[in-house]
Image: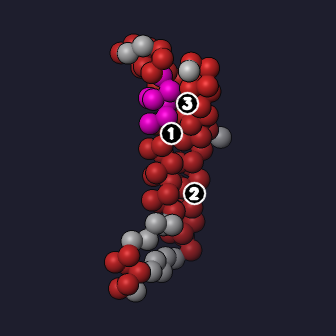
């Protein structure tokens, strides 16, 4: 719940930041960038993007259950922070364009 609240606060801050420095019509860019940043962090933390060098060299992740659980928790938290920003960006884009 705290991740979702943080995402909503970041979405509001992104809109206010956009109003303060640019115009309101660019608010979807700021919130969308914040959302994409946290979604990208989630993808990287989940380990779903293993590079070709790691696959070829046989360095597949052999994590302990605690490390795997921590990565999963961080990945889900990042998605929950990014989702309100993506939703805000989509709504602003639809209503402003």
Mark 3 in CB contact with mark 2 (< 8 angstroms)? no
Residue 59 visible in the current orientation: no
Q: Name the element at disc 1.
A: helix
Residue 37 on the magenta span: no
Q: Residues within 10 Å of mark 3 (few under 14, many from 20)?
A: many
Q: Name the element at disc 3.
A: helix
* Whole-percent x, y for residue 81 in the image: 55, 41
72 shown above or below 87: below
Residue 50 visible in the current orientation: yes
61 shown above or below 11: below
Q: Residues within 10 Å of mark 2 (few under 14, many from 20)?
A: some
The answer to which quarter of the image holds residue 80 is top right
Residue bearing the label numbered 2: 73
Horizontal side of residue 11 vs 57, given as left or right: right
Pair 3/2: label in front: 3
Pair 1/2: label in front: 1
90 shown above or below 15: below
* Spatial CA span between label 1 and label 2: 18 Å
Please give the label number shown on residue 89: 3
* Whole-percent x, y for residue 2 in the image: 60, 39
Which residue sits at x=50%, y=39%?
Answer: 35
* Whole-percent x, y for residue 53 in the image: 34, 78
Mark 3 in CB contact with mark 1 (< 8 angstroms)? yes
Name which of mark 3 and mark 1 comes first in the sequence: 1
> Which secondary structure dominates the residues rendered in magenta?
helix
Image: magenta residue range: 27-33
Q: How many marks?
A: 3
Name which of mark 1 and mark 2 comes first in the sequence: 1
Residue bearing the label numbered 1: 35
Q: Quadrant of the C terminus?
A: top right
């Amino acid at each position: 719940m705290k991740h979702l609240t943080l995402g909503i606060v970041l979405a509001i801050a992104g809109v206010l930041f956009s109003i303060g420095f640019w115009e309101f019509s660019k608010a979807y860019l700021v919130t969308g960038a914040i959302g994409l940043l946290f979604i990208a962090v989630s993808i990287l933390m989940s380990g779903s993007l293993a590079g070709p060098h790691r696959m070829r060299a046989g360095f597949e992740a052999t994590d302990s259950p605690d490390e795997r659980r921590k990565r999963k928790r961080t990945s889900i938290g990042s998605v929950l922070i990014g989702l309100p920003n993506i939703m805000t960006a989509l709504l602003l884009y639809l209503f402003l364009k």
